[in-house]
């Protein structure tokens, strides 16, 4: 199953840090030498939308790790919350491999597995939230 690029990056950004680092290490065998264009941490603004007014605002700043790499004409990018440059680099390696057409089946399987795990986690979270809902009409 192939994933659109934005969905793939969203899934990788939320993937388990240990899992993506391990997978990134395995990908290195399928890639040519990689040039690191940037590997850094920084702060980005967290955009939110006011549900009542529908207007956008910035909730605050979030610490992120960012990696940008190149292999020939192909590039890979990764940005994850927190101070984990290795996980951001592993994310960029997966993005690069997909862009270069290397280990596509392995990358697609990894992204699909992570997406399924995230969907299950999201479902569990929503169930816990729903359990706290109070219907004021019943009081």
Image (cartoon, helix red, strand yellow):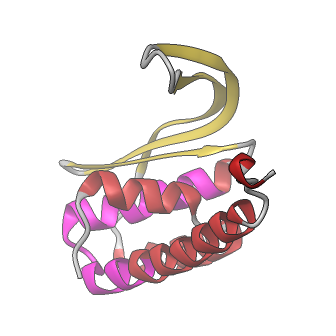
Q: Which residue is at a point 55% across and 71% down the rendered structure image? A: 118
Q: Which residue is at a point 51% across and 42% down the rendered structure image? A: 67
Find residue 99 and report its image quarter.
bottom left
Q: Which residue is at a point 54% across and 61% down the rendered structure image? A: 90
Rendered position, 109 above or below 54: below
- Left or right of residue 116: residue 84: right
Rendered position, 115 above or below 34: below
| Residue 26: % across, % down | 51, 81
- Left or right of residue 131: residue 68: left
Rendered position, 75 above or below 121: above
| Residue 18: % across, % down | 70, 72
| Residue 66: % across, % down | 56, 39
Rendered position, 51 above or below 100: above
| Residue 5: % across, % down | 26, 55
Q: Could you say which is closer to the camera, residue 50 or residue 78? A: 50
Q: Could you say which is closer to the camera, residue 34 or residue 53? A: 53
- Left or right of residue 117: residue 74: left
**Residue 92 on the magenta span:** yes
- Left or right of residue 138: residue 27: left
Instruction: Give the main secondary structure of the magenta stretch.
Output: helix
Q: Could you say which is closer to the camera, residue 21 or residue 56? A: 56
Q: Which residue is at a point 63% across and 64% down the rendered structure image? A: 126
**Residue 114 on the magenta span:** no
Quarter of the picture holding the N terminus: bottom left
Q: How many marks?
A: 0
Which range of residues does the magenta coloring cover?
Answer: 87-110
């Amino acid at each position: 199953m192939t994933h659109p690029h934005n969905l793939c990056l969203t899934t990788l950004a939320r993937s388990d840090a240990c899992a993506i680092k391990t997978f990134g290490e395995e990908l290195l065998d399928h890639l040519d030498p990689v040039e690191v264009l940037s590997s850094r941490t920084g702060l980005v603004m967290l955009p939110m939308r006011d549900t009542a007014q529908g207007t956008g605002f910035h909730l605050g700043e979030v610490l992120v790790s960012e990696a940008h790499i190149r292999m020939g004409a192909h590039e890979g990018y990764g940005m994850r919350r927190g101070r984990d440059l290795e996980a951001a680099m592993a994310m960029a390696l997966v993005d690069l491999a997909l862009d270069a057409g290397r280990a596509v089946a392995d990358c697609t399987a990894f992204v699909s597995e992570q997406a399924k795990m995230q969907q299950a986690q999201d479902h569990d979270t929503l169930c816990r939230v729903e359990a706290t809902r109070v219907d004021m009409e019943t009081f």
